[in-house]
Image (cartoon, rainbow, N blue to C red):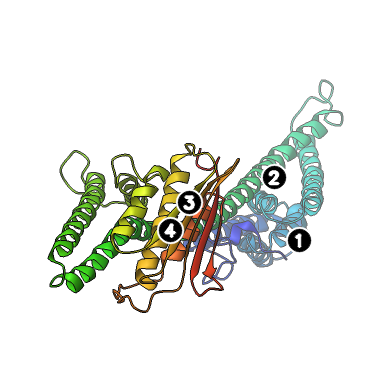
Amino acid sequence: MTATGAHQDAAGGPARGWLWWGRRRSAVLDVGLGLVSALECALEGIGFAERAAVPVPVGVLFGLSAGFVLVLRRRWPIVVVLVSIATTPAEMGYLMGIVGLYSLAASEVPRRITALLAGMSTVAVFLVTVVRLRQDVMQADVDQRDFDPSGWYVPVVSLFMTLGLNAPPVLFGLYIGARRRLMESLRERADSLEQELSLLADRAEQRAQWARQEERTRIAREMHDVVAHRVSLMVVHAAALQAVALKDPQKAVRNAALVGDMGRQALTELREMLGVLREEEAPSGGAPVPVPLAAVGRAAAAAAEAASEDGPCLDALEELVEQSRQAGVVVELMVLGEARAYAAAVEQTAYRVVQEALTNVHKHAAGAKVVVRLAHREAEVAMQVENGPSDAAVADAHLPSGGNGLVGMRERVHRLGGVFVSGPTDAGGFRVSAVLPSAAGE
């Protein structure tokens, strides 16, 4: 027998701990109904014993045994209904029949079995009611000339009495069963939605973690681009100043002035970046609030673009190259094609690629000759920075390297849909090339 919804626990699984009852009050209710039904059947068993010409204790014991079967209504509702049908000719077990039909209709028993048993119970009650009512009418003091009980009266009244006893518990049981199944379906859907929400939360956390990592990388790249180039030039000039301080005081003074200019520019860029970050931290209320990494990344990008008055652009390449020349590097700038304006993102990326490539020359190829090429094409702009082998006669400035410069350049170029290539040359130098679509960033 399939477990019915009536004896399932709150979690939807089989009941445990109270036999087939899920809760204590369910067990108390069923035992109470069983005792009431047993008492009813015991009292009705007295009349049955008189009609069947058997000892009264036998009828009472039979009624007690039959009525207490109602305790099993949650576990075996079919048994309860069958017992109620079997005791119907003995005119006992009305409570058991009503409650049994309700429990059967509310359970998970197939509907065809429920309809069959409900029909059998209806027929049994109808026949017993017809016989009993006919006997009562025949024994009553009624004028037979004006009223004939053998006609329509007995069947119609019996039918109404039978439907009044059987129809309400069946209909109410069907309603309760449908409602219980609906609640279980909604509970399952709620559990499913909870699992889906948990999965979505996990995915959102993964995306947030990925976004935080991306923003950390972006902040590091922006800081590197803004400060590393000028600091590298400062170190190169400081090394040159140390070398010529005693031999050529005038050149040492010029180098010292250049170092000062570079330091002031680096401090200005840092101040601008920190100023933007500080604005993100304390909007207007004065109390600092936690800054999301996305806001920090935007602030770093904004500060990077504000490194000069108009932000880094291709027009500033000549000044960038001149700074490297002042540091003692031989740099040749070649511009091919007709210069034109591009989107800010394209010009900034092109500028940063050339800037980082020159910074790498200062770090890794001291004294090497450098050629910077910028080509304006129809639908793209290309840049290339190529240096020869380092000059062994030039002292190495021993600049530290984080190893992230090329990675940052590649990420910048790929973000705009461009192509980035870097690697050593046959002559022993190094080449950095990038091509950016002119429509990118618009």
- Relative image position of residue 305 (x, y in whole percent): 34, 45
In the picture, residue 30 is in which quadrant?
bottom right
Drawn side of residue 365 relative to residue 418, left or right: left
Tell me the residue at 38%/59% (across/down). 221
Task: Give me the C-alpha separation between circle 1 and circle 2.
Answer: 35 Å
Read off the residue under disc 4. Answer: 214
Q: Closest to the observer: 102 or 362?
A: 362
Q: Which image quarter holds the N terminus?
A: bottom right
Tell me the residue at 35%/61% (across/down). 220
Read off the residue under disc 3. Answer: 334
Closer to the N terminus: mark 1 or mark 4? 1
SS class of the residue under badge 3? strand
In the picture, residue 438 is in which quadrant?
top right
Label for residue 432? none
Closer to the N terminus: mark 1 or mark 2? 1
Closer to the N terminus: mark 4 or mark 2? 2
Task: Give me the C-alpha separation between circle 3 and circle 1.
Answer: 127 Å
Q: Nearer the viewer, mark 3 or mark 1?
A: 3
Closer to the N terminus: mark 3 or mark 1? 1
Q: Looking at the picture, which amino acid does disc 2 mark?
A: Val
Read off the residue under disc 2. Answer: 170
Q: Closest to the observer: 74 or 378?
A: 378
SS class of the residue under badge 2? helix
- Relative image position of residue 161 (x, y in whole percent): 72, 37
Read off the residue under disc 1. Answer: 53
SS class of the residue under badge 4? helix
Q: Looking at the picture, which amino acid does disc 1 mark?
A: Ala
Q: Nearer the viewer, mark 4 or mark 3?
A: 3
Task: Give me the C-alpha separation between circle 2 and circle 3.
Answer: 96 Å
